[in-house]
Image (spheres, helix red, strand yellow):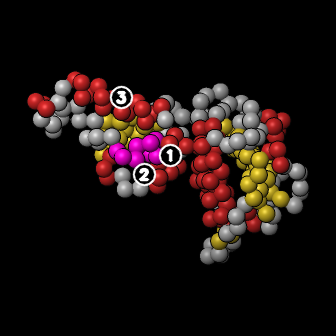
Amino acid sequence: MKYTRIIYPCGTLSGVQRKAVEMLSKTIVDETLEVPACIGWEDYVADDSFRDIFIGTKQNNPYIREHSEAILTKPEEYAIAVKNDTVIIEGYDDAGVLYGCADFYPRYVAQKSLTYHSGTYFRHIFTDVLPEAFIQSAPAVKNRGLWTWGHVIYDFRGYFDNMAKLKMNTVIIWNDHVPFNAKQLIAYAHDAGIKVIWGFPWLWGLDCSKVDMHSLVAASKEIADYYEQ
C-alpha cells in the first residue's frame, strides 16, 4: 500500500484551507491508520512511491491548474477527480476546497469501499489502486445554517466542525449579551467557512424602563468591535 501525501496550495494557508487539510487528514488516518504527509506545493517533488492528493484552486495550486479538467463557475463549488491513483480536490474558492475535502469520505471513499466475496472481511480502498471517479457539486442554496441558543453550545469547535461537514455556512446565535469568548468563537467559525449572525433579545424579556436606545447602540458597537479585531 502506498503512503499518502496531501499537497496543499502555495504560500501561507488560510484558516479555511487549514480546516480542509485537517478534515482530509482525518479521513486518511481513519481509513489507513497512517498519518499522511502534508506538504505545500513549493516543497512538492514527484515520487511514484507515494499516492498524492492535491487540494486547492486553479489559482493557488499549479498542479491543479495544469491537470484539472473541471470547470467550476459557482462560489463554494468543488470537484473531486481520481485518476491514475492520484486525487485532485478542487474548489472554486477556499470554501469549495473545504467542502470537497469534507465530501471526500461520504461521496467517494464510502461509496467505493470494497468487500471480499464473503461479505465479512472489510478492506479500505487505499489498499489498492484507487478506483477512478469524477464528482462535481455546487450549492443550490446560498445561505445554509442553524439557529441556536448561544448558552447551550458547550463545545463550539465541535459544533462548527460538524456544520462544516454538512456544508453549512451560516449560524445565528441568540444570546442576552455578548459572550465573553465571542472573539475566539467568531475566528473558529470563519476558519470553518461559517459566518456568525448574533441574535439578541431586543427588549424581549428585559425591563423596558431600564433599556434605552443609547444602551442598544452601545451593545451594537461592542459586537462590531469583535468583528473588527
On screen, residue 118 above or below 79: below
Which residue is rendered at x = 66% and y = 33% of the image?
92
Mark nearer the N terminus (1 vs 2): 2
Sequence-wise first label, 3 or 1: 1
Task: Describe the element under mark 2 as helix, strand or loop.
Answer: helix
What amino acid is at disc 3?
Answer: Lys
148 left or right, relative to 71: left
Q: Residue at x 24, y 29 (%)?
A: 215
Q: Which residue is mark 3?
A: 221
Residue with the mark numbered 1: 188
Is 189 left, or right, of 124 in this rendering? left
Which of the two labelled residues, at mark 3 and mark 2, occupies the earlier sequence position?
2
The location of residue 171, given as percent across then percent down, is 41, 40
Of the pair 15 and 120, the residue shown nearer to us: 15
Q: Taking 95 as reference, is 156 left or right? A: left
Does any portion of residue 132 appear in the rendered image? no
Measure the alpha-carbon separation of dots 3 and 1.
21 Å
According to the image, label 2 marks what residue? 156
